[in-house]
Image: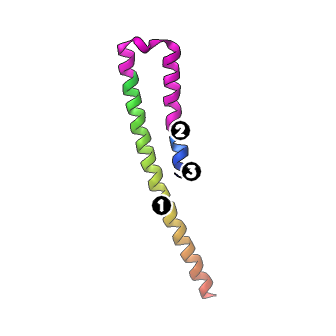
């Protein structure tokens, strides 16, 4: 797992953990409406995490490609000297 995926997971999971802690402290765990709202928020955050993970993976691929192109360009320049 790459560094950026790890950072994305922390960014997304942080608010989830905070929301769960607030729910536990507030004692609303027995309220069905609160549980439904929490579940909706959790589902939304999970979707955001999946989207962010996919985006980070795409950015990693682009960075790898750019690094390869720069390395090839540098190699060509050294051959021409």
The location of residue 53, given as percent across then percent down, is 45, 46
Residue shown at the point (56%, 71%) measured from the top left: 70
The location of residue 18, given as percent across then percent down, is 53, 26
Q: Find the distance from the CA under tag 1 to the CA under tag 3.
A: 15 Å
Mark 2 surroundings: few (<14), some (14-19) or many (≥20) residues within 10 A: few
Mark 1 surroundings: few (<14), some (14-19) or many (≥20) residues within 10 A: few
Relative to 34, 66 lies left or right: right
Q: Earlier in the sequence, mark 3 or mark 2?
A: 3
Number of marks in the rendered image? 3
Residue shown at the point (54%, 52%) measured from the top left: 2
Q: Which mark is drawn over residue 11? A: 2
Tag 2 secondary structure: helix
Tag 3 secondary structure: helix
Q: Earlier in the sequence, mark 1 or mark 3?
A: 3
Is 10 placed above or below 32 here? below
Tag 1 secondary structure: helix
In the rendered image, the quadrant that contains the C terminus is: bottom right
Give the magenta range.
12-37
The residue beneath circle 1 is 62
The location of residue 47, given as percent across then percent down, is 39, 38
The residue beneath circle 3 is 3
Residue shown at the point (50%, 35%) measured from the top left: 13
Q: Is residue 19 magenta?
A: yes
């Amino acid at each position: 797992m790459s560094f950026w995926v790890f950072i994305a997971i922390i960014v997304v999971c942080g608010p989830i953990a905070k929301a769960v802690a607030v729910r536990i402290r507030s004692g609303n765990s027995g309220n069905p409406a609160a549980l439904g709202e929490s579940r909706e928020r959790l589902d939304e955050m999970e979707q955001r995490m999946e989207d962010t993970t996919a985006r980070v993976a795409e950015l990693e691929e682009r960075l790898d490609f750019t690094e390869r192109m720069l390395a090839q360009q540098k190699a060509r320049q050294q051959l021409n000297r």
